[in-house]
Amino acid sequence: MGVIPAERLLVCVPNWIGDVAMATPALVAIRRNYPAARIMHLLRPYVAEVLAGSKLADENILWPPPRTGEAAFTSRWGLVRRLCSQRFDLAVLLTNSFKSAAIAWLAGARRRVGYTRDARHWLLTDRLPPKRSGRGFIPIPAMDYYNDLARYLGCRDVGDRLILATTPADEAAIDERLGSLDACQPLVVLNPGANYGPAKCWPAEKYARLSDKLVDRYGARVVASLVPNERDIAERLASSARRPIQIFVDPPLGIGPLKALVRRSRLLVTNDTGPRHFAAAFGVPVVTVFGSSDPAWTDTRFAGERIAKLELDCQPCMERVCPLRHHNCMGQLEPDLVLEKIDELLARPGMLSQVVA
């Protein structure tokens, strides 16, 4: 089967930062296999920065912000009219929502390719069944899920390496926040928050203890990145740390400068959240702390990643908040376990002392 022909192609991009990063092998394959096509990405404004600089689309079209009543109808109808004017030959739905399929149908895309989820099969011309076990879904890496869509289109050489880029503005912004880097003081980034919910968050006090150990053992410069609604995490982190730690919280870095920060770092320690995948894209060693979530859904096969996780009977629950109210999956996971994973990962001589220019 050859590549499905298309001169004008719409790709509905996932809504979560990590999912967007995991979709990049598929997006790269689509761009490579449709070199003459005009490719447009339909995506949420807050994930547009994830793909900034990647040159994987000719144009971004942003979902309108949430509204109610007449304003909601007006903004959605405006989006439909704009999409209709493009006369798309093909719409590729990396999203699973009914809404994205309905938009592609209303836009008049001649072929609409996606998974048969969210009762939207009748809106698709090309239907892929998701892998199931009974009524549930089989946990498979999201990257493979997206890659299978690209292969269905006829794309060849679909890879499994995440690919992101930074822009000059991203690099300038992190230059201003970081200042100069000392080649003898390796940069370590901590990502102790999670937009998904507190069940994914390793306690700030444990991050602080780990930070102290990294300063003592590796002479690291430790930087933590958070957003303003995670100010309580930032305050607990600052009050618990006994060694120097730099915390970016207000103003937040933003997605682009955070990519640049991770790119320059020699190690990322993170919860299972979007920026975890920046490390894989830039080849930066990363240790991911897992609690409620299942690593099977987000495996990127990145050789530079280690997972720090307990094996409790209640894991993984996949909940935003611990349903048992004890949060033992994170509360009982000690910094020494995470440090063991770091030591294992960075065992190669000089690994942590390298600094990205």
Image: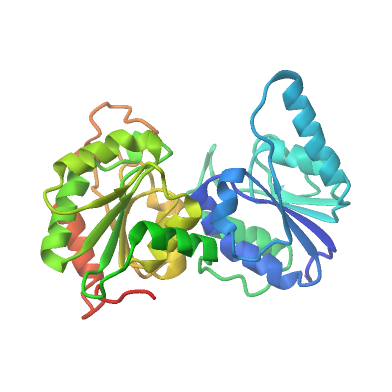
Image height check: is 275 above or below 160? Answer: above
Q: Residue at x 41, y 66 (%)?
A: 263
Up-down relation of residue 352 to residue 205 (above or below): below
Image-quadrant location for residue 236: top left
Direction top: furthest residue: 69
* 167 left or right, relative to 200: right
Percent x, y of residue 114: 70, 49
Could you say where residue 294 lies in the image, as x and y percent from the top left?
39, 47
Instruction: State left or right for residue 193 relative to residue 152.
Output: left
Q: Nearer the viewer, residue 118 or 285?
A: 285
Left or right, residue 93 beside residue 346:
right
Res 328 seen here = yes
Height in image: 157 above or below 151? below
* Residue toward you, 150 or 272: 272
Q: At x 22% / y 36%, what residue is drawn?
A: 328
Q: Position of residue 152 (x, y in %)?
A: 71, 62
Where, by quadrant of the figure, is residue 62 drawn? top right
- Quadrant where the N terminus sits is bottom right
Does the image show residue 122? no
User: What residue is at 85 percent from the left and 56 percent from the top?
Assistant: 89
- Relative depth, front residue between 256 and 293: 256
Residue drawn 32% across and 36% down? 231
